[in-house]
Image (cartoon, rainbow, N blue to C red):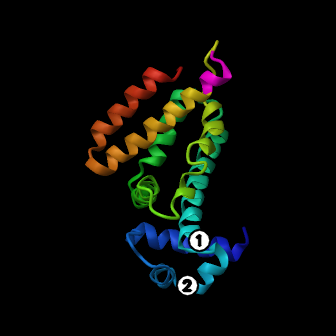
Amino acid sequence: MSDAKAALLDRVIEHLAAEGVGDRSLRNIAAGAGTSHRMLIYHFGSRDGLLVEVVREMERRQREVLSRLRETHAGLGPRDLAHAFWRHLSDPALAPYERLFFELYGSALAGHPGAAPLLDGIIDSWLEPLVGLEDVPGLTAAGRRTRARLVLAFTRGALLDLLATGDREEVDRMVDDFITLTLPA
């Protein structure tokens, strides 16, 4: 991705995280990001193409954080690494980005025209990074993949719970229990 396109995408993400997407037109999104709708069309093709790139970029950033955590916390066990990642994901400063993700995800699940590509890779792109988090003796490759999906599904559910209820104490206890029950020390 070119530097200009990446910078434009960053501005769009910041605008949409602050304001939400709703039924905003491409022109409205462009104005909020300090550009023209023509520049958005040039770089992303359409409103839907832009929103697909927004989700992919937000997800890429989170996978990058997980990768950095794995590198910087190489001596930590899977539970400690999972707790560190949860602390990152549930940071209140990231709540607007998580809300944006769920808004766009929900739009795609609701079958909005042009939103279906948002779902491409929304699960699979996480499986490889999550499969390597734990080494459970006797677990097959298929079993590790299934556990990775479980961790992803739980994490997204916990984030949605936190956003919907704001009950940090209860959600953190739930996450702690999940980590303790599913990951080796």
Relative to 88, 120 lies left or right: right
Query: At which x and y percent is residue 74?
Result: 65, 34
| Magenta highlight on residue 52 | no
Q: Quadrant of residue 20?
A: bottom left
Relative to 172, 55 lies left or right: right
The amino acid type, in three-letter code, at marker 1 is Leu
Q: Are dots 2 and 1 in contact, CB under 8 Å?
A: no
- Tell me which residue sits at (61%, 37%) in the image: 127
Mark 2 closeness class: few <14, some 14–19, many ≥20 residues within 10 Å: some
Viewer-side residue, 128 vs 79? 128
Magenta residues span 139-144
Q: Which mark is residue 132?
A: none
Query: At which x and y percent is residue 41?
Result: 61, 79
- Tell me which residue sits at (62%, 83%) in the image: 39
Q: Helix or strand or loop: what does disc 2 sit on?
A: helix
- Tell me which residue sits at (60%, 35%) in the image: 130
- Tell me which residue sits at (33%, 51%) in the image: 163
Per the image, the residue denoted by label 1 is: 9
Of tags 2 and 1, the one toward the viewer is 2
Relative to 38, 109 lies left or right: left
| Magenta highlight on residue 142 | yes
Q: Helix or strand or loop: what does disc 1 sit on?
A: helix
Query: At which x and y percent is residue 105?
Result: 46, 54
Q: Which mark is residue 37?
A: 2
Mark 1 closeness class: few <14, some 14–19, many ≥20 residues within 10 Å: many
Q: CA distance from mark 2 to mark 1?
A: 13 Å
In the rendered image, the vertical position of residue 109 relative to residue 154, given as above or below:
below
The amino acid type, in three-letter code, at marker 2 is His
Query: At which x and y percent is residue 82?
Result: 51, 34
Q: Earlier in the sequence, mark 2 or mark 1?
A: 1
